[in-house]
Amino acid sequence: MLKNIWYFCREAVKSMARNHLLSLATISTVAICILILGMAVLATLNASHLITRLESDLEIMSYLDKDLTADQASEVKQALEAIPGVESVRFVSREEALQYLQDSFGEDRYNLEETMGKNPLPDGYEIKALDPHQVPVIAQQVEQVAGIERVNYGKEMVNNLFLATKWVRVLSMAFIVLLSLGAIFLIATTIRLAIFSRRKEIYLMKLIGSTDWFVRWPFFIEGILLGTAGSLIAILLLAVGYETLIGSIQSVPFVPVLSNRALLIEVYAGLVMVGALLGVLGTYISLNRFLDV
Amino acid sequence: MLVQFYNVSKVYPKGKALDDISLKIDRGEFVFLMGPSGAGKSTIIKMMFREEEPTRGQIFIAERSLVRMKRSDVPRVRRGMGIVFQDFKLLERKTVYENVAFAMEVVSAPHREIKARVPEVLRMVGLEDKENSFPGELSGGEQQRVGIARALANQPLLLIADEPTGNLDIDTSLEILDLLIDINRKGTTIIMATHDRELVKAARKRVILLDKGKVAADYAPGEYLVC
C-alpha cells in the first residue's frame, strides 16, 4: 500500500507538470472561487458580529410606581431577578435617567431641569436578558410584577431586528452554498479536461486490470493539491486585504469589525479545507464517466 | 476449457452484431477469428475482456462466468489476459521500458518483480536494446512488439490480439505472426482477430470464420489451406 501511495503521488505530480497550463487554470479557478467565498464568509461573519452586538445592547426598561417605598422597590427587584432568563437587574434612579436624557439632548443647549422645573421621570430597573431573543417574553412577565407601572423594550425595533438578522443569515448561507456549487462545477470542468487528455491511458489501465480506485487516486491527489494550492493563494490575498481593512477601519469609532485572531485563523483553515474538498468533488464528478470501461 | 461462449447474442441500437454464437477454445490453442468487417470479430473480443456484455447467452473464461459479474471482480479476470491492439496504444510520453512496466505498475506488481520481468519480456520480443527509446522513434513492427511485450508482462493465460498486423506491411506481419506462434508454443493461449488470408494460411492454425454475426465455419489446424 505504501508503495502505491508513492506511485499515486508521483503520478499526480507528473500529471500536473505535464498539463501545467491546465493545472494553472484549475489553481486560478479555485483561487478566485475561494477568494469570493472567503469575502462572503467574512462579510457574513461581520454582519452577524454586528447583529450580536446590537442584540446584546437590547434591554428592558421598567418604570416603578412613584409611590413605592425603598423596601417595596427592593422587593420588586427580587421579583424581577427571579424571572427565568434574566441576566441582571440594575437600578436606575430618576436622577440618573434625567442625566441620561440630558446627555442625549446634548450638553448645554437645554437644561431640562430648568425647563421643566422638576424631574418628571420615575425610578426604574434596567433588565438584561441572558438571550436577547427572550426579551419580548421576559418583558411580558415584567409587566405582571406588582409595583411596575410601565415596561419599555422598543418592541417594534426588536422585532424588526430579529427579522432582519434571520434574513441576513438565510440569504448569506444561500449565497455561500450557490458559490460553492459554482466552484465545484468550474473545477469539475477544468479537471475533466485534464482527464480527457489522459483518457487513452485510463482506458489502457482499465483493460490491463486496474481497479477503479487505482485509477482514481492519482487524480484525487491532483485535485487535492490543486485545490489546496488555489485556496492558499486566495487565503493569502484575503488575509492581507482584510488586515489592511481592519487597520484602516478600526480608527473609525462605532463600526465594530471582527478582529478575533483565533476565529479568523479558523475561517482561513476552513477555507483551505473547502478548497481541497472542492478539488476532490470536482475530480469525482469528472472522473466516473471515464472509468466505465 | 479456457473460453466458452454459449448461445451468445449481442444487439446494439443500430443492429445485431452477434447472433447466437457458441464456441469453445481450449488452453494452449492458437485460434484465428476471421471474417469481413462487421462480422462480429471485435464484439467477440470485447466480450472476452468484458468491455461489452452479451444481450443473451453465457460466457465463461477459465470457468468463471462473465455475465452479471460484479464490477469489482472484472479487474481480476482482466489480469489473466493480455491484449494487443491494432493501433498499438502505446503511451507516447513513456519509453519502451516504461510502457511495459506500466502494465505491471497498474496492477500493483512489486517493484523488484517489475525490474526483473520487463527486460525478460523485451528480450522475448527482440527489443532488449530499445529499452530507452520512445514509441515515436520505432518502426510500426517494433511498436507492435512493445505492445506484445506489454501484454505478456503480467504472464497472462490468454493473449487476445485484435488485428495486430492491420497497420503493418506483409513482411513485418509475418514477423509478428512468428513471434505470436513462438509465444503460443511456450504455453500461452492466443486468440487473434484478422482478415489477412495469407497470414492465416501461412500459420496453419485453427480458424473460426465469422459472417454476419454467426459462426460460418470452424477449421481445424491446417484445414483452412484448401479455401
Image (cartoon, coloured by chain):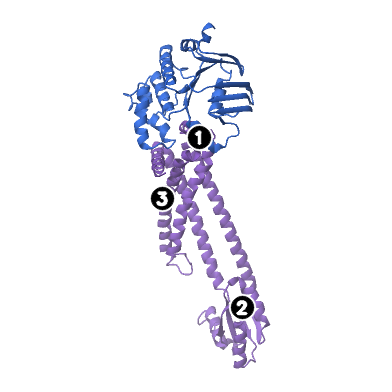
Q: The blue chain is which one?
A: B
* Badge 3 and badge 2 both on one subunit: yes
Q: Which chain carries label 3?
A: A
Q: Distance between the residues labelled 3 and 2?
A: 50 Å
Along the viewing direction, whichever of A11 and A36 lies nearer the viewer: A11
Image location of residue A253, percent across then percent down: 46, 69
Which residue was labeled with disc 2?
Answer: A84
Q: Which chain carries label 2?
A: A
Residues tagged 3 and 2 counted as in contact (Cβ below 8 A) = no
Image quarter (top left, top right, bottom left or bottom right) of the C terminus of chain B: top right
Find residue A162 and name its label: none
* Badge 1 and badge 3 both on one subunit: no
Q: Distance between the residues labelled 2 and 1?
A: 67 Å
Q: The purple chain is which one?
A: A
Q: How far apart are marks 1 and 3 (CA)?
A: 40 Å
- The answer to whether A209 is drawn above or below residue B8 in the figure is below
Q: Is mark 1 on a helix, strand or loop?
A: helix
Find residue A233 and name its label: 3
Which residue occupies 55% across, 37% down? B71
Which residue was labeled with disc 1?
Answer: B75
